[in-house]
Image: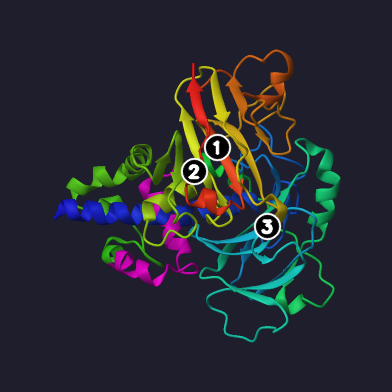
Amino acid sequence: MEENIVEKLYQAYVYAIPLVMYHLQRISSTNTVKATSTKAPVNQYIHAEGLADGEAKYIVMLNMDTVYSHIYFDLRKEPIYVKKPASDRYNSFEFIDAYGDYIDILGTGFVGGNEEVEAVLVGPDYKGELPEDVYVIHSPTNDLWGFIRILSKTTDNADYKNIKKIQEGYEVRPLSSRKKAYVQPDGIYQPENDFVPFEKINQLSTEEVFAIFNKNIQANPGKNYDRELLESVAEYGIGSGKTFLLENLPKAVQNEAAAFHERMLEEFENSRYGSLVGDWMLSDSSIADFKKNYIFRANIAWGGAGANPVEMAIYPSHLLKTGKDTIVHFFEKPPVRMTEGGFWSISIYGLDKFAIPNEMNRFGLNDRSDLVYNEDGSFDILIQKERPEGEMVRNWLPNGGQPSLIVLRFYLPTKQLLNNEWKYPEIKEG
């Protein structure tokens, strides 16, 4: 009986993590009076002023190919109007609900392509009329995350002046002000909300996790298929308007419930959410549309929020458990749909999933890098602490001599990639 209680509560804890992580990201990223390049009030864009670097820690495993913008929408009062401008490069606007599931994407490879697109975002409670001349996106949650990626055509920030023009073309306002002059309101700054979300969630107790979950679930209801799980734990104080307390549980359950986070991290460490393809771990195809795969969804929310569906991008990875010099041998260039705006890259992160600071401020290489190729069209990426001699410095990813995580990114993958028919790079350590 008590074992059954533990398991139900643990599944509820895992289920709660994405909503809690979203909440932490939202209150941290919107903790400002005016919009800046790192924070902005709710329903206002946060436009980064260049490619991510070793100091960027608002999201783990940041892409080093695109300049990010993001926005935290609140759809409680009314729908929100947005406009994605036309652009001459990969430019996508992904919408992710408060549980980490992608809803829709405007832009390259999806709705509207590289043309201008107007859309209205509608929350689950809205019953009013909607305009017929814009694209409508229905969100299952009132809290919604918008994630913008704009490709840099250079490997440094020399191209940012062009990206900035695209950023300035993005619009957002309440639907009622769509065709009116509109001034964005000031936000609120609270010192206690200055934290790194990834670090904060690892410090929360089980009671604190469920307290945040209970506070946020009313405006952000789960899917229909979540109902059975939520109903099974309601009597323990989990749900809208409820209070979860360890002391209310049977004594034999309390210690295990208090250690749910450690148990979850251990499960992350020991589980595979995909399959091995050569030396690379390829995520399960349910990524970004997880359904009842709650542990996978929690893993992505905790360690890499903002995933794309596989039709947009795939992210094979490999863990280097030592800091030894490593060669990643590509037999050929990755097959992405470059004529449609696709691109590929290879990036490296520390075990904390943040970029590794280095003398060159180089955190990734890509199809725009001035790489050295072998005569047969293959090429080698060198991952090591010491700077290589000669021209191979162009193929160097500095790792500080420490264990690290390699991540490949293939945007607009071809069927060859999606069907695992491509020969993945070979990894030679030491």
> Splitting the image into 4 quarters, where does residue 371 fall?
top right
> Splitting the image into 4 quarters, where does residue 261 fall?
top left
Q: Reading the chain from its start, which is encountered first: label 2 or label 3?
A: 3
Residue that lies at the very extreme toward the left in this rendered image: 1
Q: Amino acid at mark 1?
A: Val
Rendered view: 200 above or below 22 = above
Residue 80, image x and y in percent?
Answer: 67, 71
- Looking at the image, residue 373 sits to the left or right of residue 198; the answer is right
Secondary structure, mark 3, is: strand
Q: Which residues are magenta?
A: 202-231
Q: Is residue 60 visible?
A: no
Q: Amino acid at mark 3?
A: Ser
Q: Is residue 401 visible?
A: yes
Asked whether the beta carbons under mark 1 and mark 3 sit within 8 Å of each other, the answer is: no
Identify the image quadrant of the N terminus.
bottom left
Residue situated in front as seen by the camera: 251 or 295: 295
Label 1 to label 3: alpha-carbon separation: 20 Å
Determine which residue is flagged by label 2. Answer: 303
Residue at 53% from the left image edge and 75% from the top image edge: 124
Determine which residue is flagged by label 3. Answer: 92
Determine which residue is flagged by label 1. Answer: 407
Rendered view: 82 above or below 67 = below
